[in-house]
Every structure is written in structure tokens, then in C-alpha cells.
Image (cartoon, grey):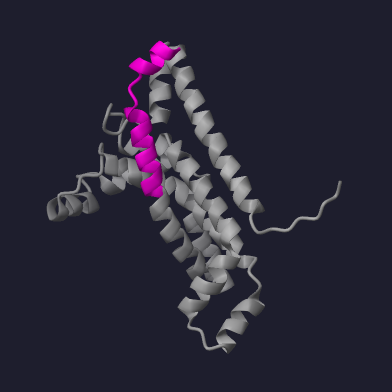
Amino acid sequence: MFEILKELDWSPLYISLKTGIAATGVCFLLGLFAAEKVMRLTPVWRAIVDGVLTLPLVLPPTAAGFFLLLLFSKRRPLGIFLFERFDLKVVQTWLGCMIAATVIAFPLMYRNARAAFEQVDVNLIYAGRTLGMSEFQIFYRVVLPAARPGIISGTILTFARALGEYGATSMLAGNIPGKTGTVAQKIAMVIQDGDYANAGIWVMIVLLIAFAAVFFMNLAGETGIKRRKYW
């Protein structure tokens, strides 16, 4: 086993971690922004926008990847615009990995952030307005601290989902070793080759990362919460 570890190509883990961190950062900012804006909409518009933003969570990842491929292909207006104006190529690049992971993981950040915001006591917001605080100050100094456990949980779940993304990434970025080949793609590839020992090592690595993510999520949920002792 140690010999296999020495000979192991660690680029899939590096690519997955880089993709997961970048996608989580984007999802964190966009998720908080979207959740805060959706909370201000009327019930009808809230239901419509919420459905659109949550759609990648219920769609098969390959279907989402198909739409992304159509959107960013160099034969489509957006793909042509990005390539000609900014020299950005999305299909079969690491940027494609990041975009695919962001789209798939975004609903987790958005839903957790919105649920956390809904649990904030509105009296705290009214008190902030009474004290003359701006809406941005209320959001940054009152709402975010009160919603911290839910936001932390959403961030960790988003990272875990982005790290393990496979379907949309395969459709948009492909599986280019050392460039777009993630851990999930590596596992699928070595299993197809019948290399179960190598696949088992990568699965164990993913399990350890997933357990660490769940552990820190549970730890964050306990932080600052005083629980009653029942036993």
C-alpha cells in the first residue's frame, strides 16, 4: 500500500482541492447575496427565483453540465464573447471545472444561508434600525453573526459537494490528466481499468475529507449553542 502511495499521482487531489476552494468562495459570496435579496421579494417572486436558484440541486448533474456546455461552447454567443474579448476558454479547462462545481454546489450555500437568515429574530433587526444603523450595518453586524452556525454549515457542505462533483465537470471540463482530472473522475477511470487497489485508495482519501467536513460542520453547529443536559 505504501508503495502505491509513493507512486500515486496526486494531481487529481490538487485539482479537486483547488476547484473546491475556488467554487466555495464564489458560492459563499453569491449565496449570501442571493439569500438576502430573495428574502426581500414578494411571496410569488420569491417562489419563482427560489425555484430557479435551487434547480441545479434537483437536476441530474449531467443535465446541468449539458446546459453549461451549450452556454459556454465556443460556438455559442457567450463562449465566443468570452474567448474573443477576454481570451477565456471554459470548455475542457480548469475554469470549466470551477464553473461546473460552483453551479452544482451553489444551491446548498443558498438554501442554508436563507434558512439561517429566516431564523434570525426580527426584533434584532428592528433594534438596529432604531439605533440608526444602515441596512448594510444591520446585515453585517447583526444578521450575519446571528446566522453564523447555518452559514458555516452551508459553507462546509458547499465545499464537500464541489470537491466531489463529477457529472457536470465531466460534461464541461472533460477528464484531462493534470489539468481537469479531479478525484471523482480519477476513481471512475481507474475502476473502468479494473485497478481496484488504486480506486480504493482514492475512495479512502475522499472518505477522510468527507468525514472531516461533516465533523467540522457538526462542531460549528455546536459552537455558541447552550444545550440542555438530558442524561
Q: Nearer the viewer, residue 7 or 88?
A: 7
Q: Is residue 125 above or below residue 88?
A: below
Extreme left residue here? Answer: 84
Please state if 175 lies on the left or on the right of 43 as rendered.
left
Residue 169 among magenta residues: no
Q: How many marks?
A: 0
Q: Is residue 7 shown in magenta? A: yes
Residue found at x 48% / y 41%: 161
Q: Quadrant of residue 142?
A: bottom right
Residue in view at x 58 percent, y 71 percent: 43
Query: Where residue 228 sits in the image (x, y, percent)?
Result: 80, 55
Q: In the picture provided, is 200 more to the left or to the right than 186?
A: right
Front residue of 51 and 122 = 122
- Can you give x and y, in whole percent of width and height, for residue 55 in the image? 49, 51
Residue 93: image location, x then y, percent: 25, 39
- Residue 128's image quarter? bottom right
Q: Residue at x 18, y 54 (%)?
A: 81
Which residue does the image show at 25% across and 44% down from the upper left?
90
Locate the N terminus and report the quarter of the image it occupies.
Answer: top left
Task: Please tell me whether residue 135 is drawn above or below residue 115 in the rendered image.
Answer: below
Residue 67: in sight, yes or no? no
Q: Which residues are magenta?
A: 1-23
| Residue sticking out furthest to the right | 231
Q: Nearer the viewer, residue 58 or 126?
A: 126
Q: Is residue 222 visible?
A: yes
Is residue 144 left or right of 75 when viewed as pictured?
A: right
Q: Of helix, strand and loop, which mostly describes the magenta segment?
A: helix
How far from the left and from the top, in percent, is residue 222?
66, 52
